[in-house]
Amino acid sequence: MNSEPQAQSLCLQNRYIIAVVREQKIAFLSELVSETIAIDKRKILTLPMYDRSVFGVVHDRGNIIPLIAWNSKEQTIGTKLVKETLIAIRLSHLAGDLEGVGILVDRAIGTLDREQIEASDEEIKIWEINHISQEIWRAKR
């Protein structure tokens, strides 16, 4: 019996991808992340009839990716929107209804495990699925 895949799975369960939005560090559980992608801002189709936390959609490698702020309660994406290339943390199938959604961040800076986050002198917020309200998907009039 090979325990290596199980050990890798256990290791990933405790790892977080650390990103920054404005000056706030945010930790995304690695299992909830399918990839980190760079997006050309000019290719984003904005959706003004939706909540302010929905920045738009982009076509990437045959997929339509909704792009949203990291926390729909804050309704902000960050201050780096003047950049030509944006960074998104794309959610995996384990994110349920949010699978494939891109969470916009200013930058991804590395990975930490849970113990490192808890021991950090800096405040690092753990991102959770419930940070995104289902209300953002309803068109406004």
Image (cartoon, rainbow, N blue to C red):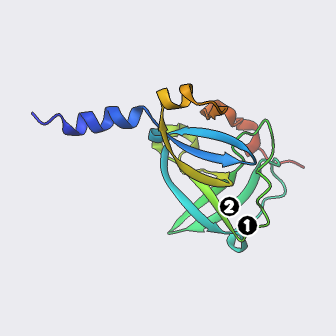
Q: Mark 1 Cα within 10 Å, few/some/many (few <14, many 20+)?
A: some
The vertical placement of 45 against 117, above or below, is: below
Q: Position of residue 51 (x, y in %)?
A: 81, 47
Q: Mark 2 Cα within 10 Å, few/some/many (few <14, many 20+)?
A: some
Q: Position of residue 133 (x, y in %)?
A: 72, 35
For marks 1 and 2, the one nearer the N-term is: 1
In the image, 104 versus 68, the foreground residue is 104
Question: Which residue shows up at 79% across the image and 66% down it?
Answer: 82
Q: Is residue 31 left or right of residue 43?
A: left
Q: Position of residue 13 (x, y in %)?
A: 40, 33
SS at mark 1?
loop
Question: Which residue shows up at 61% across the image and 47% down it?
Answer: 19
User: Dot 1 corresponds to which residue?
Assistant: 45
The vertical placement of 129 against 46, above or below, is: above
Q: Position of residue 20 (x, y in %)?
A: 66, 47
SS at mark 2?
strand
Amino acid of disc 1: Leu
Q: Are marks 1 and 2 in contact (CB under 8 Å)?
A: yes
User: Dot 2 corresponds to which residue?
Assistant: 57
Quick one: which residue is furthest to the front in this view?
121
**Quarter of the image where the N terminus is located:** top left
